[in-house]
Image (spheres, rainbow, N blue to C red):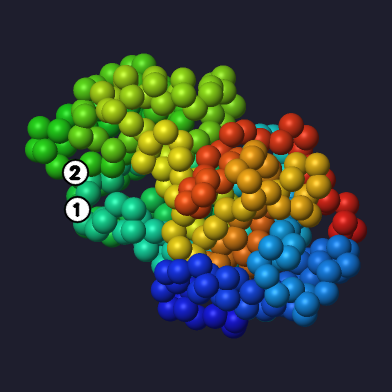
Amino acid sequence: MSLSKEQVFSISINAQFNAAALRVFRHQAANCAVYNKFIQGLKVDATKVNQIEQIPFLPVEFFKSHAVVSNNYPVEVSFSSSGTTGITTSRHLVTDVSWYVESFRRAFRLFYGDIKDYTLLALLPSYLEREGSSLIYMADDLIKQSENSDSGFYLYNYEDLYHQLKKQQQAKKPTLLIGVTFALLDFVEQHPINFPELIVMETGGMKGKRKEMIREELHETLCKGFGVSAIHSEYGMTELLSQAYSKGNGIFSTPPWMRIITRDTNDPISLITDGKTGGVNIIDLANINSCSFIATQDLGKVYADGSFEILGRFDNADIRGCNLLIA
């Protein structure tokens, strides 16, 4: 193992992050077969990578076709992405799920405080209807951690959710509603509510259920439907073990062991440092048993303080550079 949990989750300054990232890179470059082959395809000498700007980012598509693991331990849990019929989904083989649990518990505490202070309501029907969702795994654990009998999951029982929200409002209990986008929209169409104290957190995704909307229109609709001043958001993905959070305006912040870097859309090896829009690369040091350096299909912009915004996705399904690895 390249780093312990304590070394990763106690990171607080850039110098610590950079040193840890280089250690994790060397471990994964040597022990993750698909990443090793990708690095060789780029003709990068891993032993000569001395700055994080030199680290190659593995295109996220490889999670659809390869076992991206950095050790030989048994797989404890296999997370899979959602996808429409005929679309190959990603698989994230997790050999030590305690890294994921530690990551999302610490991140929630960092951004929102003690989970026991909240009633957590989860409106995640499309995720509940299939197996292997990392989001459901996280929500289920946080619901249990809340130690609150009112916390729980909702499928399409919108009326029950409405009554629970009214109960929470009358009791003046801090409440967080996390939901997939299409279900939140469906809910407010049928049961608009004026609950200014409610935290509404959307996880993205129409899942083919509704027409895609730009963020401003979506958040305006949800703010009006719930009677809140801002919509929070969670940014995560099957291939990662960490999440970023936004408390409004679509501006996300990462926990200290996670970082967003943008790359040139025409040259995936070149990084962007001037705040322009680029492809989103993610360093997730909690993903130590897989690959911590992922090139996503998202387009985004990183600000000077490290916060970031997601602006869309690549039009083409395959990010340039995938052909550097022969399957």
Above or below: residue 185 compared with residue 41: above
- Label at residue 95: none
Closer-to-camera residue (246/165)? 246
**Residue 114 falls in which quadrant of the image?**
bottom left
Residue at left 78%, top 54%?
269
Quadrant position of residue 155: top left
Mark closest to the chain's N terminus, 1 or 2: 1
Identify the disc placed on residue 174: 2
Kind of residue at badge 2 = Pro
Tags 1 and 2 touching, CB below 8 Å: yes
Q: Position of residue 113 (x, y in %)?
A: 26, 56
- Percent across and percent down for residue 233 are 42, 40
Q: Amino acid at mark 1?
A: Asp
Q: Is residue 33 above or below residue 252?
A: below
Q: Can residue 296 be seen at all in this image of the molecule?
A: no
Say which residue appears at 53% left-offset and 34% top-offset: 205
The numbered disc on residue 117 is 1
Left or right: residue 45 versus residue 56 is right
Question: What whole-number distance in Å separates the C-alpha atoms at marks 1 and 2?
Answer: 7 Å
Q: Residues within 10 Å of mark 2 (few under 14, many from 20)?
A: some
Looking at the image, which residue sits at the far left?
171
Q: Residues within 10 Å of mark 1 (few under 14, many from 20)?
A: some
**Residue that appears at 62% across and 33% down:** 312
Nearest the viewer among 130 and 265 is 265
Number of marks: 2
